[in-house]
Amino acid sequence: MTSFELLRSLAVVFHLTGLLVCLLGLHLARHPQRRWPGRALALCGFIIAATPTLLQLFGIIEPVPISAAPPN
């Protein structure tokens, strides 16, 4: 299994975990005393959710090239 295939299979886990962390942070940010920790937690959740895309964007994991479709 290549690193790209592993990343594709773990992408859903990253997205769901990041979404839950982000929503928890936004919920905490509604309260005035917990505004900054909530915003920081929401930012961490966004980074967790964006990890698969960021790994490909910065070239840490190379995406598999897609070949052209065969002519009909």
Image (cartoon, rainbow, N blue to C red):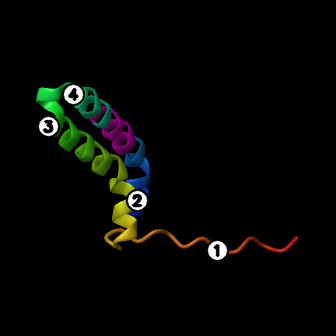
Residue 4 is covered by the magenta coloring = no
Question: Sequence order check: which comes first, mark 3 or mark 1?
Answer: 3
The part of the chain drawn in magenta is 13-21
Q: Which of marks 2 and 3 is in front?
A: 3
Is residue 18 magenta-colored?
yes
Of label 1 and label 4, which has the lower sequence position? 4
Image height of 18 relative to 24, above or below: below
| In front: label 1 or label 4 | 4
Check disc 4 and give the amino acid type.
Leu
Q: How crowded is mark 1: few (under 14 residues within 10 Å), some or many (20 or more)?
A: few
Q: Which of 13 and 70 is in front in this view?
A: 13
* Callout 3 amino acid: Pro
Residue under numbered circle 3: 37
Q: What element carries label 4?
A: helix
Check disc 3 and report its element: helix, strand or loop.
Answer: helix
Amino acid on which disc 2 is placed: Thr
C-alpha distance separating marks 2 and 3: 25 Å
Which residue bears the numbered disc 4?
Answer: 28
Considering the whole magenta stretch, tell me its main secondary structure: helix
Q: On screen, 33 above or below 56?
A: above
- Give above or below for 46 relative to 27: below
* Marked residue nearer the N-terminal end (2 or 3): 3
Which of the marked residues, 3 or 4, is nearer the chain's N terminus?
Answer: 4
Q: Which residue in the rendered view is the most extreme toward the front?
A: 32
Q: Position of residue 22 (x, y in %)?
A: 30, 37
User: Please, what secondary structure does the residue beneath circle 2 have?
Assistant: helix
| Residue under numbered circle 2 | 53
Cβ–Cβ under 8 Å for marks 3 and 4: yes
Q: Which amino acid does label 1 sit on?
A: Ser
On-image quarter of the N terminus: bottom left
